[in-house]
Image (cartoon, grey):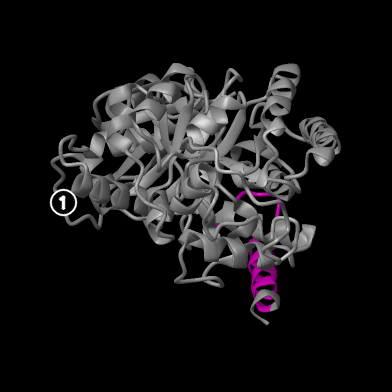
Amino acid sequence: MSGMLLCAEHIIPVTQPPIDDGAVLVRDGRIVEIGGAQRMKARYPEEEVRDFGRSAIMPGFVDCHTHLEYTALRGIVHDVPYAEWLAHEHAKADRLTHDDRYDSALLGGMEMLAGGVTTVADFTSTGASREAVRDLGLRSVIYRSVGVPEKAKVDSAMKAAVEDIQDWRGDSDPALTRIGVAPKALHACHPTVFKRVNEVAAKLDTPVAMHMAGSYEEYRYIKNGSTPLSVRGIEGDDSLTDRPMWLPTGVTPVNYALNWGAFHSKDVLAVHCVHVDDQDIAKLKEYDVAVAVCTRCNAQLGMGLAPLQEFLKAGIRVGLGTDSPAATDTSDMFTEMRLATLIHRAVERSNFLTAQTMLELATIGGARALRMEDETGSLEPGKRADVIVVDLSGSRQTPLVDPVTAVVTGAAAADVLFTMVEGVVRYERGGTWNINVEPAEVAHRGIQIRGKLRD
């Protein structure tokens, strides 16, 4: 079967130095070879050549944490801090039907493809986002969210989760989608859920992910038992007294989770990890827990700042997440990289983050965090062909000194020319889509959903 020879002024493999005037040969969904364009064209004269000129060919972004089903909620709950946002956002989300969530997730997934994201890790309790990524051809890890505050309901909640995981696996392409399990937020979960999640993960061989130490409110709630945080909205109840008063534990959220065995699975991803101390970081490393850092969301909702450089210094596997589109308003990994670079440089001056490190976090770092680094996250022969092309013809840095810096500090999602997942071209700039849905219909339904939520 013939393949495709992708050529450009710059190739950014990420795990190797950039190549000028290079080419990437793709065949049967895999990367076959990378090298100089002239030599590759001479060697493979029968291949279809796509020459993108003054552009950078690089691996697709790996978004380590999002909630695609909430895309339609953008800007509806705005300019409020985390605890207030969470309560109002849950109340709005409760009004979404399964079809609404599917259409909302399609909108978010299409934006990701158009912005160069080829792998996404998503939390869902309904499975609507899994249906969306299946129909878009996105590579994904879909975590089935599970958790109840009452001990008496844990058995039935876990049973339902296991049934969903098995059903979702049967309806997914295993080459593209892995199904995982995610206990709900610490304050919304009876602690015995963690042990049960470990049992499910071991039995079904699934990855585990969880929100961890994300906000000031959660930190104080777990440790001291007194904050404005409640589980409002999680059961569709706006009451402040919908569960017994939390008993203060006197420990950090990471320690609390450890006490209940939350990290005892072989593949665990902790999202946020903003409010952690040196001991917490040591424990995350000891249990080989990966971290999804969501700097933009944390800043937007006043949640704090994760000690990213400390994680890297400790050797923890770290990736970037755009988090809920209802909070961040765009699923844009370029903005995520740039803001994270600037904010962490400003605050953690002793460990200066480079553009190269940030690009790694958005690609191969995220792949390592999801234990997918053998398959995606960099341009290497044998890996799956998850490839994007970023237009640098309008870059203020022309002629370029370093394409990595140009991408991280100057490029935008609108500069993505071409997105390929598993060797299939899913998006080309100008509105050319190769997906199993009609883009105009998805956009129209998104407008209808937002109208309903605004009323």
Question: Was residue 37 drawn as part of the magenta stretch in this picture?
Answer: no
Circle 1 residue: 398
Residue lying at the far bottom of the rendered structure: 455
Q: Secondary structure at mark 1?
A: loop
Is any atom of residue 378 visible in this view? Answer: no
Q: Quadrant of the C terminus?
A: bottom right
Quick one: 445 or 228, which is closer to the camera?
228
Q: Is residue 421 left or right of residue 153?
A: left
Instruction: State the image coordinates of residue 142 (x, y, percent, origin top left).
Output: 65, 38
Kindly identify the residue that appears in the image at 56 percent across and 57 percent down: 229
Q: Is residue 406 left or right of residue 95?
A: left
Instruction: State the image coordinates of residue 382 (x, y, percent, origin top left).
Output: 48, 17
Q: Quadrant of the N terminus?
A: top right
Which region is colored magenta? 432-451
Say what amino acid the circle numbered 1 marks.
Thr
Magenta-colored segment: predominant secondary structure = helix
Kindly identify the residue that appears in the image at 44 percent across and 17 percent down: 286
